[in-house]
Image (tube, helix red, strand yellow):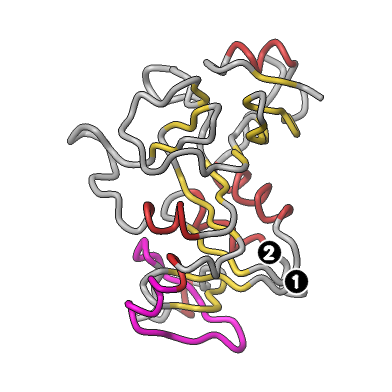
């Protein structure tokens, strides 16, 4: 193997590179919460957290932690200049009402038609509840997914023809960022936009249950 997969911070940084100036973005728990750490200070991206934060900033330095300022995953965050707090009901009205330019969610699996499965089916898996994911998946204008390409332990692919986990939402995913590649959902299925250095098409296909397409 001549390639080195991205770590979780690397996936988050890769997503941050692609978010345009001025977008209003929600970050789900897990890998997505790290995206705000990698957006340059001179680029204005407004991050929303469904617990009621608008204008969330990157993680604070250890000596700058505000114990009462957290995101939806209970991680400590900062507040960017102009940021604000809103009522929980208002925050979910934003999530459901088509006001978000983008939502980035973690997932267990994504299917080639854009279906997403991101909550657990057994007690030994980390996410036991769907939380606000269903609202965000159908309420945001775009949905990107951040996840590792292969499952831990079993080595199965998360890039699927059909999801084997319970669905969070159908046909909503636009793009998938993994530790190996960036994939776009197209009428033909998964289209490959980018791969990590050193990886071949054959190696990426071997690690993907669904058929991949290159343009």
- Judge by depth and name the residue closer to the eye, 35 or 139: 139
Q: Residue at x 40, y 84 (%)?
A: 86
Nearer to the camera, 102 or 123: 102
Q: Which residues are magenta?
A: 72-93
Q: In the displayed structure, would residue 179 be above or below residue 89?
A: above
Disc 2 element: loop
Q: Residue 76: x percent and y percent?
A: 42, 70
Residue 39: mark in rendering? 2
Task: Give the residue displayed 34% in from the left and 65% down from the top.
Answer: 74
Residue 157: image x %, image y %?
48, 20
Magenta span contains residue 88: yes
Instruction: Give left or right: position of 77 versus 190.
Output: left
Q: Position of residue 180 (x, y in %)?
A: 64, 29
- Secondary structure beneath dot 1 equals loop
Looking at this rendering, what residue extends furthest in the right direction? 215
- Pointer 1 with pointer 2, Cβ within 8 A: yes
Locate residue 73 relative to residue 205 in the image: left or right.
Answer: left
Q: Quadrant of the N terminus?
A: top right
């Amino acid at each position: 193997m001549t390639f080195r997969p991205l770590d979780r911070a690397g996936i988050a940084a890769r997503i941050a590179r692609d978010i345009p100036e001025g977008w209003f973005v929600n970050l789900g728990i897990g890998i997505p919460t790290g995206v705000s750490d990698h957006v340059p200070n001179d680029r204005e991206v407004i991050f929303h957290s469904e617990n009621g934060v608008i204008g969330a900033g990157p993680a604070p330095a250890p000596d700058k932690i505000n114990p009462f300022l957290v995101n939806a995953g209970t991680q400590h965050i900062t507040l960017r200049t102009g940021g604000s707090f809103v009522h929980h009901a208002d925050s979910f009205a934003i999530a459901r009402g088509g006001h978000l330019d983008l939502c980035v969610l973690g997932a267990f699996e994504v299917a080639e038609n854009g279906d997403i499965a991101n909550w657990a089916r057994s007690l030994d898996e980390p996410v036991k509840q769907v939380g606000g994911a269903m609202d965000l998946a159908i309420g945001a204008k775009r949905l990107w997914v951040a996840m590792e390409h292969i499952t831990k332990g079993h080595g199965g692919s998360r890039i699927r023809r059909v999801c084997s986990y319970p669905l969070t939402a159908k046909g909503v995913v636009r793009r998938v960022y993994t530790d190996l590649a960036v994939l776009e959902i197209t009428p033909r299925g998964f289209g490959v936009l980018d791969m990590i250095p050193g990886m071949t098409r054959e190696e990426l296909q071997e690690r993907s249950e669904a058929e991949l397409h290159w343009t």
